[in-house]
Amino acid sequence: MNQKLMQEKVLTREDVKRLKLTEGDICIPDVYTTIGESAFSFCDNISSVTIPNSITTIGESAFSYCYNIRSVKIPDSVTTIEEYAFFRCESLTDINIPKTIKTLKCGTFAGCKALKHITIPSTIEAIEGPVAEWPAYAHEELLMGTFEECHSLASIVIPGNITVIGDRTFADCKSLIEVDIPENVTKIGDSAFAGCSSLTKVSIPNSVTQIGAMAFANCKALKDITLPSGLKRISAKIFEGCSSLERVVIPNGVESIDSVAFGGCRALAEIVIPDSVTSIGWGAFVSCGSLTSVTIHSGITNIENNPFSRCHSLTIINVDEDNLYFSSTDGVLFDKKKELLIQFPAGKMLEAYTIPDSVKTIGRAAFESCKQLTNVTIPEGVTIIEDSAFEYCSSLAEVKVPRSVTTIGTHPYSDLYDSFRNCPLLTLSVYPSSHAYNYAVAKGIPYLLVT
């Protein structure tokens, strides 16, 4: 049939039922030009599908939840495959994408857990992420990347025409081992490779200038990565949970390391922060258990809360004496005036510590998980003890809290952010009728009255 002479004719869900195209090996009649939205959705008795040359469009969710489809033959006549077209086709092992397709849309093959092989043709120009216009209350499955949860997909060749790898494109592709990103790519989206737990090697070209939040989060087998020279920002949680990551090269030119960027990188023993970096976000290196020392250079102007908390091997934080905003005394990180105690290294082998008299605020999670500390003296003049300041200090037995303290971090409905949460041996020394006394009574913490 001459496709140019055909008027558009949509194969609907009603047509599928009428023509009894609901089980076994089916061939779609060549009188149709479009497979309509959800036409075959939940037809889980279909084994294979042959699509005729008359079809130009496969509609949104056309074959979604066809759990037992093993093969689909897509002709070159197809120019558009809409979002979630083959979503949750969990028995599909391989598929051909015709060269007539220019864009791979979000969720197209998401949840195809048996999909082992797929060839992305060189004609593909974009791999889109989830549609930003969808409402915030949209179901999570409507926010999935093109190949997300393709658990059996062990290799992928990304064509050279691609400039953007969309959000969540390969998230949770648990068998993916190696990725070579082509030279034309400029952006890797949020969570693009998150949860690729077998991924051991990623080659990122210098053309990439933006890598989104959580892009490689929980890539637990990744040991080594070199970031591209054009990168200005290391996004939030970009390598969170990469527990095998031993080495990362941050290029000179990066200006900010965002919150929890390297959180839980337990094997990371050394990090070189380049001179271009001016800002370190909260918890940027939280739970980097192998990190032993850190140097804050002179150009860093912003450090947010608990950047190095739960780093159990960290014994010293050095600060360049020319830095105008921060300082270090005995390896402890302060602001320049030493009025804010930002971070006490969790691996510092001290049982007793006296906070300097200049300090007015003990920062959030400043002493978190300092398991060797048994005694801390807080000087008169400190007014604020922020959330989680001494959380998980499991050996902490005595803290004297002065009358000057007017704020101790707490949560109105739980102990989730309490300053002294999970300090099982703790007794607070407090003054009668002081804020600390009221706090101890309210939280049921043992206390001694200071007279």
Image: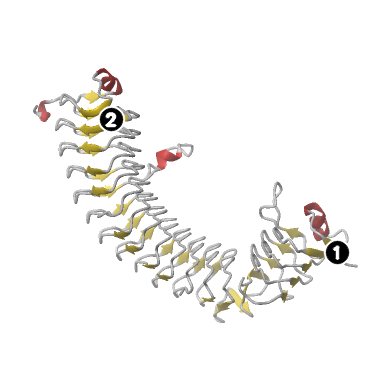
Judge the density around disc 2: few (<14), some (14-19), many (≥20) Cα neighbours within 10 Å.
many
Q: Is residue 387 above or below residue 299?
A: above
Give the quadrant of residue 408.
Answer: bottom right
Question: In the drawing, what numbered circle is on residue 448?
Answer: 1
Nearer mark to the viewer, of 2 and 1: 2
Question: In the drawing, what numbered circle is on residue 236?
Answer: none
Q: Is residue 189 above or below residue 134?
A: below
- Horizontally, residue 443 falls left or right of residue 181, namely right
Q: Residue at x 64, y 63 (%)?
A: 365
Which amino acid, mark 1?
Leu
Nearest to the observer: residue 415 or residue 406: 415
Q: Position of residue 436 (x, y in %)?
A: 80, 60
Q: Position of residue 30 (x, y in %)?
A: 15, 26
Judge the density around disc 1: few (<14), some (14-19), many (≥20) Cα neighbours within 10 Å.
some
Of the image marks 2 and 1, the number of the one nearer the N terminus? 2
Q: Which residue is farthest top?
A: 18
Which amino acid, mark 2?
Ile
Q: Residue at x 27, y 28 (%)?
A: 36
Q: Position of residue 76 (x, y in %)?
A: 15, 39
Question: In the drawing, what numbered circle is on residue 46?
Answer: 2
Q: Classify mark 2: helix, strand or loop.
A: strand
Nearest to the observer: residue 373 or residue 138: 373
Report, in whole angstroms, how far the alpha carbon at label 2 lies from the one at label 1. Answer: 73 Å
Work out whether residue 205 can be spotted: yes
